[in-house]
Amino acid sequence: MSEIIDALDQLEKEKGISKEVLMEAIEKSVYSACEKDFGKNTEYEVRMDRETGKIQVFANKIVVDVIYDVHREMTLEEARHIDPNAEIDDEIRVEVTTKDFGRIAAQKARSIIVQAIKEGERSAVFDYFASKEKDIITGVVQKVNDRGLTISLDEKTETILGEQEMIPGERYRVGDRIKLYIVEVKKNPKGFKIVVSRTHPDLVKRLFEREITEVSDGIVEIKSISREAGSRTKIAVHSTDPNVDAVGACVGMSGTRVNNIVDDLKGEKIDIIEWDEDPAIFIEHALSPSKVVSVKLVDGEKAARVIVPDYQLSLAIGKEGQNARLAARLTGYKIDIKSESQAKELGTYDEDYDREYDEDYDKEYDEDYDREYSDEDYDKEYSDDEYDKEYSDEDYDKEYEDDYEDEYSDEEYDDYDESSDK
């Protein structure tokens, strides 16, 4: 049986599967064979010698006058060969190994080793992908159909990227490389399943960590992310080093860093926001590129009332409400946006407060804000003609003003405000 020990030693060395675990599995397998051959009414003990691989099987037998079951009973004469003091009705432990046990043991050992190799390989693959959970991995598209993509992650492992987890508008062909976010790796009766996504907000977070050294080093922290995959993402960042500009580090020289991430996301727009511990300031930043006149937090609620210049209302709310919606998710606050004219009509415009806010704003933030978001710098930082065209005041108002007025007429807004106040 030494060849079994040699095989187990080699398996332990090459596959990292414990020899002791395999020996215990072989013992259990031989035990099952005994129950099958001799019946389950007898208690067996299987021992495999850790040095030689020899297998012995022991069973308890009752001493009787007349034997009716050879697997459970033995005569007094047989018993006294083992224990000279044996008497009728005593229970004697006896070895029941037969010449067939060597063959049985070898067969069982062989099947156990083969199964162990398969399980060991599956376990190693599972452990590898489990270590990649909540991270990005690159795969190769193998099949394309209406339900999504079949993607090869290595020579033996595939996963499915469902249509609902694909970025809208993305198109792939067989052989294309694709970056995936591993949401979860979970075991199932057939092995394990790798759940992947391209729409998960943390895909953007991991891309920032890979692309931007300051983020991976912890100098720049990602505080929160809100995303509508395929369209736009807002990401709030904060620098732990006063000498490092968080937004600038993420944008990079001429936008190179953020543009690399945009390319990975097939052109998805990314707004990088300066996080602030003051919720009002954070909300103001989150609504960029729109300017803000004032932000008032609602006492006892996680909500804020925001007033913007009349000409900035469309920009603050965004196409189909996207800018306001993403800002609300980013900050965790319910945001009610009104223009100055609407606020005055509704009686929610506090001129004293807003005058004071404007003075503080102009003194503390306006120069930096205008410098950061001036047309010239904005074009230089985000050199994207299509983006500028979409969000320029003139084009934006021309394209969305009528739709917005239809959807947010003063009359409907008054009704909405009265119901919300109730």
Image (cartoon, rainbow, N blue to C red):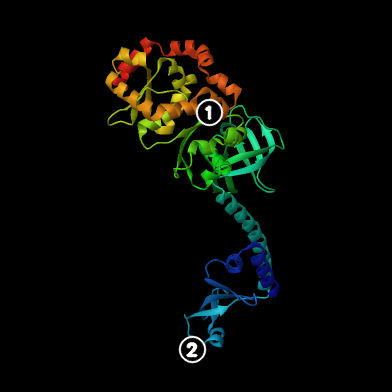
Mark 1 → mark 2, Cα distance in angstroms: 88 Å
Point out the image quarter for the N terminus: bottom right
Q: Position of residue 100 (x, y in %)?
A: 68, 72
Above or below for 420 versus 24: above
> Observer-nearest residue: 135 or 205?
205
Q: How many discs appear? A: 2
Above or below for 170 versus 118: above
Q: Position of residue 216 (x, y in %)?
A: 53, 46
Q: Can you identify the residue that label 1 sits on?
A: 232
Q: Is residue 310 left or right of residue 125?
A: left
Residue positioned 52% across, 77% down in the render = 61
- Check residue 85 in the rendering and tell me which mark sits there, or answer none: 2
Above or below for 101 versus 325: below
Q: Is residue 41 left or right of residue 409?
A: right
Query: Circle 2 — which element?
Result: loop
> Observer-nearest residue: 68 or 25?
25
Toward the right, the furthest residue is 175
Sooner in the amino-acid sequence: mark 1 or mark 2: 2
Q: Position of residue 285 (x, y in %)?
A: 43, 30
